Amino acid sequence: MNTLETLALPIANYQALSPEELFQRTVTAKGVLGEQVLVLGHNYQRDEVIVHADLRGDSLILSKMAATRSHHPFVVFCGVHFMAETADILSRSNQTVILPDLAAGCSMADMAAIEQVDQCWEELGQVLQVEEAVTPAVYVNSAAVLKAFCGEHGGITCTSSNARVVMEWCWARREKILFFPDEHLGRNVANKMGLPRDQMIVWDPFLTCGGNTPEAIRKARLILWKGHCSVHQMFQPAHVAYFRRTYPGIQVIVHPECHENVVNQADLVGSTEFIIRTVSQAPAGTSWAVGTELNLVNRLKNEQTDKQVFFLSPMVCRCATMFRIDAVHLCWSMENLVQGHVVNHISVPDDDKAPARVALDRMMALC
Ligand code: 13P
Ligand code: SF4
């Protein structure tokens, strides 16, 4: 790699390139970098990006990759900001994580700020012996500082594929769980575990005590943060009803970030990887209505030609932030790496890294 002091290549140089040029130049850059770089791609990424991924998967699989592939000095993470942060926390100190576009965030992750979670903890402490009574469990779709909060307070992280095991772990230790930032994932898992409705409350961070009475807090076993995914909230029970009416025998499979009214109507629910695996392994001739991000569903549709695959909503439900990672940004970050420039380095501050790692390691030990 060239270590001369040259300026980073500007992104503007890439915007007019054709898809073919971008593809070829990315392949070439990857070839030059060889084992120095590992390209990870989340299941929601566009085809033009995923084609370059060495490994693709859901959040849990990608976290495990980041933790175990220590011989690549550079990890180019084609996903969103919280995933790249998780990779930075789990990777070795000599590894550098790059997010091709820093604007690739997650609207759900933005629905819980550390100041709000601190305030919630303090308010819970006015009603309960909070450190003994409540385990904080944070969905990985969250900033590193929230994972650090969990590490410091006896808590844990979870993904969509292990939320149930994590909630069992939490309840085995303390009476209550504070689950954030996705209300729906927490509720859907608790529903499947048979938790009665009157033991779940919602914590609205913009209201005093989350909008709850002290009695309700004392009675609750699950405190659900009022947060959601703007993509998955678009799916409606009417969409399920439409497919059942129009295609008798169709199977409906959805992501657990969907509202419970949709999840309860579905045949199957699971992570992006579970959805891909289930549909891919299904017998030829079966029909599927899939409730998750559009890129994933379109790819399934194109790959599983012996089955009928439909997108569950009549609207376009695309993760706008995942979509920020495109062939232009990927090529730009890879060619800069060839030139010795690290662009868009994701580096979690050390103060957050160690406690966040504690919370992630607790989760990794369970699955
Ligand atoms: P998975 O962990 O299922 O890949 O989901 C991540 C995500 O952000 C879904 O919206
Ligand atoms: Fe975040 Fe929703 Fe996009 Fe997943 S699909 S990254 S939860 S905004």
Image: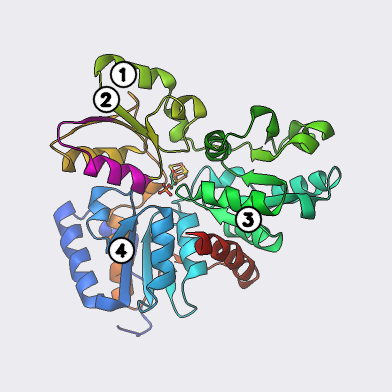
Q: Does 283 lie within the magenta span? A: yes
Q: Residue at 17% of width from left, 40% of height from top? A: 304
Q: CA distance from mark 3 to mark 4?
A: 31 Å
Residue interval drawn in magenta? 272-288
- Residue mark closest to the camera, 1 vs 3: 1
Question: Nearer the N terminus, badge 1 or badge 3?
Answer: 3
Tell me residue 149's x, y (percent).
Answer: 67, 58
Crowding near the residue tagged with mark 1, few <14, some 14–19, many ≥20 C-alpha atoms within 10 Å: some
Query: Considering only vertical position in the picture, is 65 above or below 120?
Result: below
Q: Is residue 217 visible?
A: yes
**Which image quarter holds the N terminus?**
bottom left
Q: For the residue marked with disc 3, what is the amino acid?
A: Leu
Q: CA distance from mark 1 to mark 3?
A: 40 Å
Coloring scheme of the render? rainbow
Crowding near the residue tagged with mark 3, few <14, some 14–19, many ≥20 C-alpha atoms within 10 Å: many
Question: Nearer the N terminus, badge 3 or badge 4?
Answer: 3
Tell me residue 320's x, y (percent).
Answer: 40, 41
The extreme top residue here reads 245
Question: Nearer the N terminus, badge 1 or badge 4?
Answer: 1
Q: Which mark is residue 146?
A: 3
Q: Marks 2 and 1: CB-CB under 8 Å?
A: yes
Q: Which residue was labeled with disc 4?
A: 332
Q: SS for tag 3?
A: helix
Q: Marks 1 and 4: CB-CB under 8 Å?
A: no
Q: Quadrant of residue 308?
A: top left
Q: For the residue marked with disc 1, what is the amino acid?
A: Arg
Q: Is residue 207 visible?
A: no
Question: Nearer the N terminus, badge 3 or badge 2?
Answer: 3
